[in-house]
Amino acid sequence: MSDNSNPRRTSPMLWGAGVALLIPIILPLLVGTYTKTDPKLGDIPFFFWYQFALIPVSALLTLLAYKLVTASDAERRASSHDRSRGGS
Amino acid sequence: MSDVNGVSLAVFLFFFLLVTFLGFVAARWRRVAPLESLDEWGLGGRGFGTFIAWFLIGGDLYTAYTFVAVPALLYAGSAIGFFAVPYTIIVYPIIFIFLPRLWSVSHRHGFVTPADFVGGRYDSKGLSLAVAFTGILATMPYIALQLVGIQVVLEVMGIGGGENASTLEKDLPLILAFAVLAAYTYSSGLRAPALIAFVKDSLIYVVIIVAVIYLPHKLGGWGDIFGAAQDKADASNTAAGKPVAGLFPADTSHWAYASLALGSALALFMYPHSITGVLSTRSRNVIRRNAALLPAYSFLLGLLALLGYVAVAAGVDVDNAQLAIPQLFENEFPSWFAGVAFAAIAIGALVPAAIMSIAAANLWTRNVYKAFINPAATPKQEATQSKVVSLVVKLGALIFVIWLPKEFAINLQLLGGVWILQTLPSIVLGLYTRWCHRWALLAGWAVGMGYGTWTAYKQASPSDPTVHHFGSPLALLPGSDTTTGYIALTSLVFNLLVVLIATVALRAGNVSAGSDITEPSDYYADAGDERVTITAAQASGSVAVDDDRGRAG
């Protein structure tokens, strides 16, 4: 996630983005937490509606990560342009 | 051939002709430079914006496999088939994390394939060749899977199929469809699937939304549908005398479910065709934005998977589970809409097949032809070479379809997944660190490939006693009697262990690690930065890429 290329500390924003991206990776892997029938949503067993519910959750978290990373990029660009133009 | 429905066939042919027309017209779409370079033919000019990329990458990832194989598993009573949903949940954060770095370094150095990157990073033609070889090998069964998708549609429509059909009669429509596909891929390159993807996804969205609203309404609601699926699972369990089916994975199958999801997600973006889709985008933010937008497809995929249960409730009775969904459409939809649905599946096979053959052809051209056969190849020669190889790759896929058992098309793709995942250490670790030694990566790759292929070979099919080899993507974990896991992921663990140990040994022995043509800043360069837009096409004096071209996207 982080750019280890620039001599700088990983910003809190990038850490936040990393966490936002890890949640949708880890939750679906905890299969034991959702292999059950109840509580049902209408007629749909938990196993199915839970995984459907994870889709918009992961999309929103990825969107959050996008906002954080673009903000962090803009910040870095501003500072690296100040330092030198020949770095890239 | 007597039960062909004229209305369905006419609607189907209409859409097929429409996309054929679009496929050829695409050669002129959004083009400023001549098609005679890989950047133009093979990457669509590297200028696709968020909107087009969404369709293109979505069209890439959600294929005939989606329509046919995933619901087929649920129809057959294997809840494990629903792993496709967590898989597509996991894949987008992963794309978000890794692929912008690959985009950046590829744009700085004009890399067209992942093997280009590996070659440049590790100064090793051998490792680059291994990655390219694996990519081509893994893509073949994936294209074959698309062929299977078209085949089942044709069979349900009553053309070419049937018990007594001769081989030629059975395969002729398929060969014709593929010949047309080959022709417009040859002439238009990546622009053809990009343009057709609009039609494909629109059709698929319409068909699925109609199917999941109309069919449950007709069949008494989701409660009855899950009830019917549960009854069928109970009946299979009684017949087998042990639990073999259910609405969700049994306790011993949790790791199987999770490892299939994780392994497939990691494998997906190692495939040359997903990387082709990603490298054709205009900037690294297009990739990130798409990672947040593409889950719309995951929802669709989940709904599709549930159609397997809808088919059970609707009383669809077919021996070959893959026919379940097309048969469901045939039985329950009015014939004109069934034609639309069949067209959606068939076109859903054509788009990814085109992208995959382009990606495989690019690998051949850059990492075999240019690296070993004709190092002085001009961009025009490269493009010509790729065009011809894209034809050869499709032919190879046809042979794949005839040679391997088709009972569960998904296993073909999963076998490809076993192979392609073994390139992950070279590509992904390489994006972050140069610590791994090139020969260690090569050794790890060889061990992973060998172990994975051997283990897959040993698996008999759990559902079909006549299949003794390559019958399942799952195998018992080493040292366990009960827990199964996805072979690809287990192989990757062995692969990584070898990389780790061999790197330590080679470094201790001071074996040359080669030079590295990339520099740290390459990995976060973005459109507009210095040197980013230098591609082979421009270096050879073709028209420069300017930002205005992206506006349509």
Image (cartoon, coloured by chain):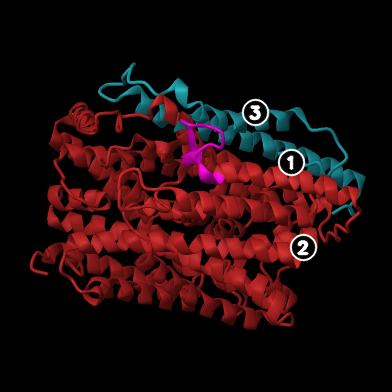
- Helix, strand, or loop for circle 1? helix
Residue B464 visible, this angle = yes
Task: List the residue tagged with mark 1.
Answer: A73
- Name the quadrant of the N terminus of chain B: bottom left
Q: Which chain is cyan?
A: A
Q: Amino acid at mark 3?
A: Val
- Quick check: B76 left or right of B317? right
Local secondary structure at mark 3: helix
In the picture, residue B551 is in which quadrant? bottom right
Chain of the residue displaying label 2: B
Do the residues at discs 3 and 2 belong to one chain? no
Name the front one of labels 2 and 1.
2
Given this view, does label 3 or label 2 mark the residue nearer the observer? 2
Are there few (<14), some (14-19), or many (20+) residues within 10 Å of tag 3?
Answer: some
Rendering coords of residue B477 (x, y %): 53, 36
**Alpha carbon distance from label 3 to label 2:** 32 Å
Viewer-closest of B22 and B356: B356
Q: Which chain is represented by red in the image?
A: B
Please tell me how many numbered marks the rendered image carries. Answer: 3
Rendered view: B319 above or below A43 = below
Which residue has dot 2 on it? B120
Q: Which residues are magenta?
A: B475-488
